[in-house]
C-alpha cells in the first residue's frame, strides 16, 4: 500500500479494497516500526488520525469524498494544529498546543486528509540539515549516517521512507527543495503568496511559503490543488485564480524552452552531481524541449543578501516569544527583563540565537542602510535577472543542491559552510518565484535533485514539466533499502 | 567585520537574550564570519537601484475597521505560563 500513488489509493478507497482506517493503521504500524531509526516525527497523533479515518470512510460511503479523502498525510511541525502539539522543532514551543488550525491544515482536513502526525524540522526552520531541532537530528533513509537536508527534513525522510503518503513543508531559502533533493523525493515551493501563511509559524515573512513534499509530481498536484488559494487572514496572500494542477499534468512539453543558468554549473558544484543533472537535461531534449544558455549574473549574491533579509525578519518575528503569553518561561525570574532574556536564551538553540542576533545587529541604528536596505536593493537586481530570463525561456533548470547528503555532524561547527548548501535555492525565494526539485539518477547510491524554477504563478507548468520527466523515467519510484 | 565581546553583549541585550559569558567568544567569531559573507554585497553598486518592498509588488490590502474575531480570552490563556483573573502575570514592573 505504501508504494501506491495518491490516485491509486483514492481509487482503492472508493472500491473498498481497503478502508481509510486500514490504510491509516498500516502507516501507523510502519511509523512505530521504522521511525525509531529516522526520528522523522516529533508527534504521532494515532488517536485523532483514526477518528479522521473513520470520518473519511463515512464520506467515502456517502459519496462526498474528494481525491484526498482518507489519504494519510503528515504536517511539518511549523503548521499550527489545534489539539496536537506544534513545537516548530524548538524547546521554546515544546509545551505549545495551538488554539487554532493553520489555513493549510484546515483546508486539507476539509478535503478529508488524515493527519498521522507532525514531522521533525530544523528549529524555527533555520537550518539545512535538520540538526538544529530540539528533538535531535533526522536520519536520511538512504544512509542513516547522513543528514536528510532541512529545514523540512522530517517531512522529506518520512515521505522517502513511505511513513506517510505525502507531507507538507515550508520553504524560506530552500527548505522544501533541498531536503527533497537529498532524500530523493519531489518537492514544490509555490509562488510567494500562493498558499496561506496563516497559522504557519513565521520565520522570514517576505520569503516563507508553504508547499508539498511527495513521491511524485502527480501526488504533489493533488495536494496543492487543495492547499493553494486566497486567504483573507494572510495579508500577503495572493488573490490570483488557482488552476487545476492535476488537469495540467498530461500536457505535452514539445518545444518547451529550458534555460540553464551558467552560474548554477560553476565552481562548487560536485562534478558527479553535474553529470547526472546534464543527463536529466538530455532526457528533456529527447522529450522535445529546447535548451537555452542563460545568465543570472547577480545570483551568486543571493546567499549574502539572504543572510541579511532572513535574520532581520526573523529577529522581528521571534520577538513575540517572550515567556509571557505562551511557550517556554524560565524559573524564578528576578524582573521582567530577566524573564525575557532567560526564557529566550533557554528556549532557543544556538542557530536561532545567532540569526536573531545578526538580525538585531543589521537593523540597529546606524547599520540599517548598509545592510538591510542594501540587501533589499540587490534583491531587486536578483529578481530582475529572473525577469529577463523568463522573457527568453519557459522554465529554468539546474541542480537543487551542490552535493548529495553530507554526514551528520559535518557542518554543524561552521554556520557559513552550512549556509552555502542553499546557494542554488535561495534566489528563488528572494524573487518570490516557484521552484521544484525532482529526483534524477543517484550518485554513489545517494539521491540527486534537479531544480526546476518557473515564472510567477506557473506552478501548473512546473508540475507538468516534472510529471513528463517522471512519466519517461523511473528515478522517482526508487525506495531506500529497508523502507520499500 | 569583526565583532568583539562587547559588541555581542550589546546585540544580545537588543535581542533580549541572556548569553552566558563563556559563549560570547564563540558568538563573536560566528557572527563575524557571517558578516564577512554578507560583506560580498559591498562589491555591487546599488546607488541607482530601488529597494524591493514586495516580491510581487503588491500593495497592502485593507479591510473595513470592524471586529472580525470573537473574544476567546480563556481559550488563549489556557496555554499561558501564568495568569490570574484573566491577566497575564509577570514580575513586578513598578514598585
Image (tube, coloured by chain):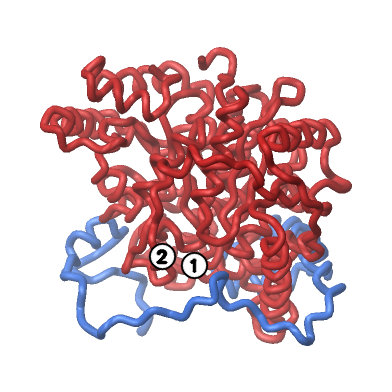
Spatial CA span between label 2 and label 1: 26 Å
Question: Looking at the image, is A204 positioned above or below residue A3?
Answer: below
Which residue corresponds to mark 1? A317
For residue A413, above or below residue A63 = below
Q: Residue at x 23, y 28 (%)?
A: A50
In the image, A428 versus A454, the foreground residue is A454
The picture places residue A297, in percent across and down from the top left corner, at 81, 63
Total number of numbered discs in the rendering: 2
- Asked which secondary structure carries label 2, the reply is loop
Asked whether residue A90 is in view, the answer is: no
Q: Colour of chain B?
A: blue
Tell me, for residue A180, which label it has, or none. none
Residue at figure coordinates x 40%, y 53% from the top left: A243
> Which chain contains the residue that carries disc 2?
A
| Point 32% across, 48% down: residue | A105
Q: Quadrant of the N terminus of chain A?
A: top left
**Which quadrant would residue A153 be assigned to in this image?**
top right
Please state if A45 lies on the left or on the right of A479 as rendered: left
In the rendered image of the structure, the colour used to display chain A is red
Q: Position of residue A472 (x, y in %)?
A: 60, 27
Residue position for label 2: A240
What is the x, y in percent for residue A412? 71, 43
Foreground of the two, A131 or A341: A131
* Chain letter belonging to callout 1: A
Q: Is residue A474 left or right of residue A195?
A: right
Amino acid at each position: 500500500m505504501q508504494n501506491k500513488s495518491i490516485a491509486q489509493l483514492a481509487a482503492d478507497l472508493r472500491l473498498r479494497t481497503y478502508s481509510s482506517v486500514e490504510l491509516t493503521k498500516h502507516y501507523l504500524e510502519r511509523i512505530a516500526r521504522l521511525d525509531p531509526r529516522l526520528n522523522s516525527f516529533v508527534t504521532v497523533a494515532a488517536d485523532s488520525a483514526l477518528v479522521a479515518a473513520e470520518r473519511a470512510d463515512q464520506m467515502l460511503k456517502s459519496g462526498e469524498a474528494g481525491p484526498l479523502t482518507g489519504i494519510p498525510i503528515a504536517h511539518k511541525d511549523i503548521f499550527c494544529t489545534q489539539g496536537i502539539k506544534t513545537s516548530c522543532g524548538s524547546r521554546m514551543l515544546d509545551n505549545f498546543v495551538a488554539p487554532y488550525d493553520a489555513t493549510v491544515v484546515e483546508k486539507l482536513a476539509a478535503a478529508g486528509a488524515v493527519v498521522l502526525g507532525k514531522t521533525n524540522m530544523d528549529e524555527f526552520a533555520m537550518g539545512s540539515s535538520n540538526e538544529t531541532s530540539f528533538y535531535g537530528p533526522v536520519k536520511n533513509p538512504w544512509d542513516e549516517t547522513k543528514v536528510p537536508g532541512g529545514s523540512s527534513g522530517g517531512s522529506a525522510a518520512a515521505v522517502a521512507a513511505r511513513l506517510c503518503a505525502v507531507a507538507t513543508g515550508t520553504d524560506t531559502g530552500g527548505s522544501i527543495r533541498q531536503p527533497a533533493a537529498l532524500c530523493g523525493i519531489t518537492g514544490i515551493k509555490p509562488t510567494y503568496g500562493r498558499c496561506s501563511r496563516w497559522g504557519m509559524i513565521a520565520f522570514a515573512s517576505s520569503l516563507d511559503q508553504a508547499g508539498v513534499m511527495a513521491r511524485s509530481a502527480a501526488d504533489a498536484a493533488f495536494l496543492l490543488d487543495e492547499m493553494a488559494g486566497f486567504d483573507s487572514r494572510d495579508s500577503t496572500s495572493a488573490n490570483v485564480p488557482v488552476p487545476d494542477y492535476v488537469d495540467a499534468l498530461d500536457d505535452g512539453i514539445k518545444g518547451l524552452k529550458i534555460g540553464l543558468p551558467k552560474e548554477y554549473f560553476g565552481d562548487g558544484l560536485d562534478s558527479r552531481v553535474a553529470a547526472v543533472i546534464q543527463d536529466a537535461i538530455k532526457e528533456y531534449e529527447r522529450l522535445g524541449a529546447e535548451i537555452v544558455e542563460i545568465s543570472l549574473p547577480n545570483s551568486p549574491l543571493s546567499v549574502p543578501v539572504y543572510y541579511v533579509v532572513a535574520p532581520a525578519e526573523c529577529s522581528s518575528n521571534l520577538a513575540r516569544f517572550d515567556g509571557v503569553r505562551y511557550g517556554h518561561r524560565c524559573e524564578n525570574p528576578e524582573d521582567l527583563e530577566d524573564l525575557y532574556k532567560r526564557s529566550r536564551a533557554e528556549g532557543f538553540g544556538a542557530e536561532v540565537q545567532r540569526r536573531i542576533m545578526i538580525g538585531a545587529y543589521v537593523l540597529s541604528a546606524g547599520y540599517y542602510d548598509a545592510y538591510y536596505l542594501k540587501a533589499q536593493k540587490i534583491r531587486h537586481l536578483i529578481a530582475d535577472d529572473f525577469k529577463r530570463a523568463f522573457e527568453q525561456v519557459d522554465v529554468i533548470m539546474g541542480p537543487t543542491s551542490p552535493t548529495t547528503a553530507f554526514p551528520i555532524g559535518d557542518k554543524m561547527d561552521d554556520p557559513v559552510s552550512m549556509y552555502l548548501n542553499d546557494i542554488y535555492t535561495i534566489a528563488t525565494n528572494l524573487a518570490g518565484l516557484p521552484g521544484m526539485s525532482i529526483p534524477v539518477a543517484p550518485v554513489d547510491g545517494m539521491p540527486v535533485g534537479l531544480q526546476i524554477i518557473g515564472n510567477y504563478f506557473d506552478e501548473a507548468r512546473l508540475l507538468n514539466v516534472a510529471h513528463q520527466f517522471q512519466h519517461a523515467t523511473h528515478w522517482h519510484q526508487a525506495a531506500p533499502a529497508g523502507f520499500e | 567585520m569583526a565583532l568583539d565581546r562587547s559588541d555581542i553583549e550589546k546585540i544580545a541585550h537588543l535581542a533580549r537574550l541572556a548569553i552566558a559569558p563563556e559563549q560570547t567568544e564563540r558568538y563573536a567569531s560566528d557572527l563575524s564570519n557571517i558578516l564577512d559573507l554578507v560583506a560580498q554585497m559591498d562589491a555591487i553598486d546599488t546607488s541607482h537601484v530601488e529597494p524591493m518592498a514586495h516580491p510581487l509588488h503588491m500593495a497592502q490590502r485593507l479591510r473595513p475597521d470592524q471586529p472580525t474575531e470573537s473574544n476567546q480570552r480563556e481559550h488563549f490563556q489556557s496555554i499561558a505560563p501564568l495568569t490570574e483573573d484573566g491577566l497575564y502575570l509577570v514580575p513586578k514592573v513598578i514598585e
